Amino acid sequence: MKKIVLNILIVVFALIFIGCGWYLFQYYWNAKQAGDEIDKLAQLVEDTEAEADNAPDIAEDIEIVAPNGERKFVLKKYKKLYKKNNDVIGWVKVDDTPINYPVMMTPKDNQYYLHRNFDKETDSNGMPFLDAACDPDDPYNNLLIYGHHMRSGMMFAHLEDFEDSSFYKKHKIIHFDTLYEKGDYEIVAVFRSQVYPADKDVFKYYEYIGHLSEKRYKEYVKGITELSMYKTGIEPKYGEQLLSLVTCAYHVNEGRFVVVARKLPVLQQ
């Protein structure tokens, strides 16, 4: 009898082991495929930019309506990317990390790309997306971009590299281009937070999205500076657009890891 029970347990544990192994294989295989597709998109942008060398930056055959209603021309480097999917709003990059992704925006369904890839197919990796309340053309905006924290290291998992102040000192700039303007942002604060109960009286970074009055802008800067893991010495001034990159973190329930940066003047790029 004992031998039968032992054999049953062996079979059960073997099946569990195989099941876990299959799950992990699928997870990382899907992550590899997603990564390969992103690499192709990055290469498409690089190739398109190379083709446009010694030519005007803008693609005069592609005119779009910006979130503020103004009509603008797409940068040539993003021309083919935009033709593949016109939900793309720009591109975000953090040097020396895998963070090098298109950024999506869907005003009618803010979280459309939470679990979809660039081709609009179901994908647990999702795509980084700009909150629908944001306007990249408004200098008084706090642009919030959300990306998943994947165990594979994809999407915004490597935002947590900024937890190390020595990494920050070598990577003080985040690159975020819109479709029609190149942009560099200087890091202001790096912190952990969480999504709090609605009735909890505490600073909630996620309540400061999109256009901010001068009062709320200063409240946000004060709040993130106090939460920051280390002091950067950078104090944004009202009228300097803010960029907040957000991903999940697991230090508490509904935890978040956030990196906030201010836009540099075009002449400093």
Image (cartoon, helix red, strand yellow):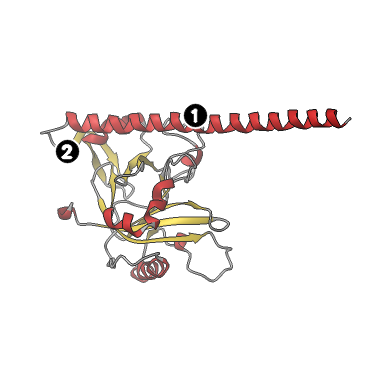
Disc 1 marks a residue whose amino acid type is Trp
User: Residue tagged by mark 2?
Assistant: 57
On the rendered structure, is 144 left or right of 54?
right
Which corner quadrant of the image does residue 87 belong to?
Answer: top left
Closer to viewer: mark 2 or mark 1: 1
Q: Which mark is residue 29?
A: 1
> At x 46% / y 44%, what residue is drawn?
108
In the drawing, what numbered circle is on residue 251?
A: none
User: Which residue appears at 74% of the width and 30% of the height?
Assistant: 10
The correct choice, above or below, for 175 with respect to 192 in the image is above
Foreground pick, 190 / 22: 22
- Front position in the image: 242 or 250: 250
How many marks overall?
2
Q: Secondary structure at mark 1?
A: helix
Return the x and y of residue 5 as percentages of the image width and height.
83, 31
32 sits to left or right of 183: right
Q: CA distance from mark 2 to mark 1?
A: 37 Å
Give the mark nearer the N terminus: 2 vs 1.
Answer: 1
Q: Position of residue 253 (x, y in %)?
A: 58, 57
**Is mark 2 in CB contact (under 8 Å) with mark 1?**
no
Amino acid on which disc 2 is placed = Asp
Relative to 127, residue 34 above or below: above
How far across and down, in percent of the image, does residue 233 sit? 28, 68
> For this view, does 39 lie left or right of residue 76?
right
Can you name the residue that lies furthest to the front here? Answer: 3
Q: Tell which residue pokes out farthest to the right in this image.
A: 1
Image spot of residue 28 (x, y percent): 50, 33
Mark 2 secondary-structure assignment: loop
